[in-house]
Image (spheres, rainbow, N blue to C red):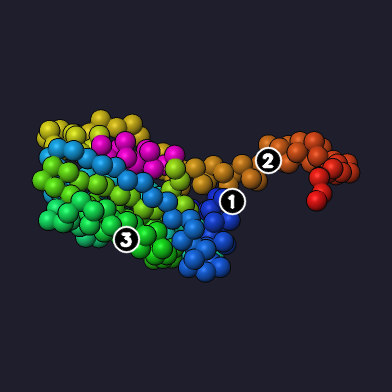
Amino acid sequence: IELTAPTTEPQREVWAASQMSDEASCSYNESVSLELSGHLDLKILRTCLIELVQRHESLRAIFETSGSRMVVLRQMGIADIMHDLSTLPEEEQVAHMAAIGEEQMGTAFDLTNGPLFRVLVFKLGQDRHVIRIVAHHIVCDGWSMSILLGDLSRIYTARSQGVEPDLPEAVPASRYAHEMDAFYASDANGDVKAYWKDLFAGALPRLDLPTD
């Protein structure tokens, strides 16, 4: 274990909803695919994925059974990622990717043991590949996905050229969690709550809805 941090209020909401059932948890599975044309060095890609996971705390995170704390591990492994579909006709390739994608989106993440991040690579031809990233919403959202893809692209390009990637500091998820925890306990948070309470004070307006 590298560190622990309090979960944020949105994370606790996702955690609570995910405890209802595997189906409920799967509704928080996020996925993005990237189609690549040109040579892809899978050995370098795997190294880059490990580097990406080490760069971002959230990709090494698991959660205590109470859902109140996030645990960041020192390392998180990457499972076997390759699916070689290059010998199949195009229609079968599409069908296989759809079936595997449906399976991944329908497989619940283990929030207490991890990992909460999966990567699949489909080889469609000698120079045609599709990379698919699947992650649980408790550690990754749509905005985060774009950051991960951008980082992965820059890391892969640099490593392919034998140089160090030029990346800005990755803001640790734990830092954000501690800052939010401090805000919840601050006078500023009380002011925000008071503002919204005052704004919506008074009787609720009557809704004049059409009827059949």
* Callout 2: SS: helix
Could you tell me residue 135's position as x and y percent? 39, 53
- Of tags 2 and 3, the one toward the viewer is 3
* Residue that carries the numbered disc 3 in the rendered image: 99
Left or right? Give the position of 21 relative to 195.
left
Helix, strand or loop: magenta stretch: helix
The earlier-in-sequence mark between 1 and 2 is 1
Q: Residue at x 30, y 49 (%)?
A: 132
Q: Is residue 15 above or below residue 52?
A: below
The Cα atoms of the two marked residues, 1 and 2, are separated by 13 Å
The Cα atoms of the two marked residues, 2 and 3, are separated by 46 Å
Q: Residue at x 26, y 47 (%)?
A: 131
- Of tags 1 and 2, the one toward the viewer is 1
The Cα atoms of the two marked residues, 3 and 1, are separated by 34 Å
Identify the amino acid type marked 3: Ala
* Residue that carries the numbered disc 2 in the rendered image: 189
The earlier-in-sequence mark between 2 and 3 is 3
Identify the amino acid type marked 2: Asn
Is residue 149 shown in magenta? yes
* Residue that carries the numbered disc 1 in the rendered image: 9
Q: Residue at x 12, y 56 (%)?
A: 87
Q: 207 or 54: which is nearer to us?
A: 207
Furthest residue to the front?
212
Residue range of the region highlighted in magenta in the rendering: 143-153
Which quadrant of the figure has residue 186? Answer: top right
* Callout 3: SS: helix
Say if mark 1 contacts mark 2, CB within 8 Å. Answer: no
**Dot 2 crowding, Cα within 10 Å, few <14, some 14–19, many 20+:** some
* Callout 1: SS: helix
Q: 38 or 141: which is nearer to us?
A: 38
